[in-house]
Amino acid sequence: MSDLLPTANSLPAIALGCPEWGEEPECGDAGETRPFSHPEQGLLDALAWLNSSDWQLKGKGLFSIRRLAICHSEILLTRLHDVTLAVTKEVNNLRSKVSRFAINTLGELFRIMKKHMDQEVEEVARALLQKTGDSSEFIQKAADQSLGIMVGSVTPARAMAALLAGGVNHRNVLVRRYTAEHLLTVMEQIGAEKLLSGMRDSVELLVHMLVRLAQDCNQDTR
């Protein structure tokens, strides 16, 4: 299983110990990501920090999750559902620094864990789509970027189902617009022939959803 996952050497470096992680979650690319000496304990610590009420500890937990994903993806895989839930919860953190870092961390989980994240797509997509309608342009951009990584990393059919469920009927026009953009990408990946060869009920639902988007009041969504 571990050979399906990327190694630290195949991934871009992320500097550790960046004091302004909230301002720039990626912390640049000048440093080297260090593996944990005891990754299992590192995972337990990260989950505990994410469960803390201290926003700085939450940031430390998110940074540790990224570090584990890069250097110890096989360890992260053992608790991937718990980790994803904990990170997704912080997407709605009232501190924009924590929210933005959580959004970017989800993108990294998709980038690194790829189809291992299939089971988590629906919940994560709902949270990210909600943030594409945020009043902060920085949050919008981060959510859009992580959704793009999601679409390019997981099984296309899973991504399409999550987008249809989480965004097509959303009240926020921005959410519907971003949903349409990412849905177009997924449909291009799958291809028209395969899309139309599915179960009749599934095809009818897809066509119905596409008609709704094509008739949307927003020009960009159409």
Image (cartoon, rainbow, N blue to C red):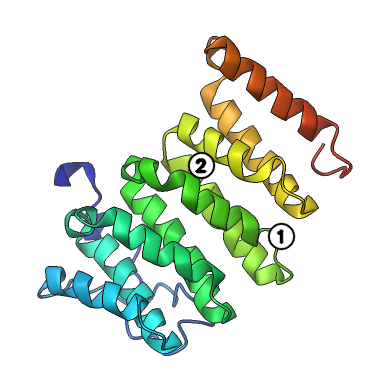
User: Residue placed at 37% from the left, 42% from the top?
Assistant: 119
- Name the one closer to the observer, 124 or 34: 124
Disc 1, SS:
loop
Q: Kindly identify the amino acid type of the residue bearing the numbered disc 2.
A: Val
* Quarter of the view holding residue 4: top left
Q: Position of residue 198 (x, y in %)?
A: 52, 13
Say whether residue 192 is visible.
Answer: no
Q: Kindly identify the amino acid type of the residue bearing the numbered disc 1.
A: Gly
Residue 24 shown left or right of residue 3 in the figure: right
Give the residue number, with chain letter if any, for mark 2.
151
Give the residue number, with chain letter if any, for mark 1.
133
Residue 220 shown left or right of residue 107 in the figure: right
Q: Earlier in the sequence, mark 2 or mark 1?
A: 1
Residue furthest left as drawn: 38
User: Residue placed at 53% from the left, 75% from the top?
Assistant: 93
Q: Position of residue 169 (x, y in %)?
A: 72, 42
User: Residue placed at 21% from the left, 70% from the top?
Assistant: 43
User: Residue placed at 41% from the left, 66% from the top?
Assistant: 87
- Name the one closer to the observer, 35 or 160: 160
* Quarter of the view holding residue 83: bottom left
Give the quarter of the figure containing the N terminus: top left
Disc 2, SS:
helix
Label 2 to label 1, Cα distance in Å? 18 Å
- Name the one closer to the observer, 138 or 129: 129
Looking at the image, is mark 2 or mark 1 nearer the viewer?
1
Residue 99 shown left or right of residue 42 in the figure: right
Say whether residue 104 is visible.
Answer: yes
Q: Position of residue 177 (x, y in %)?
A: 74, 46
Q: Position of residue 77 (x, y in %)?
A: 23, 53
Q: Is residue 221 above or below residue 89?
A: above
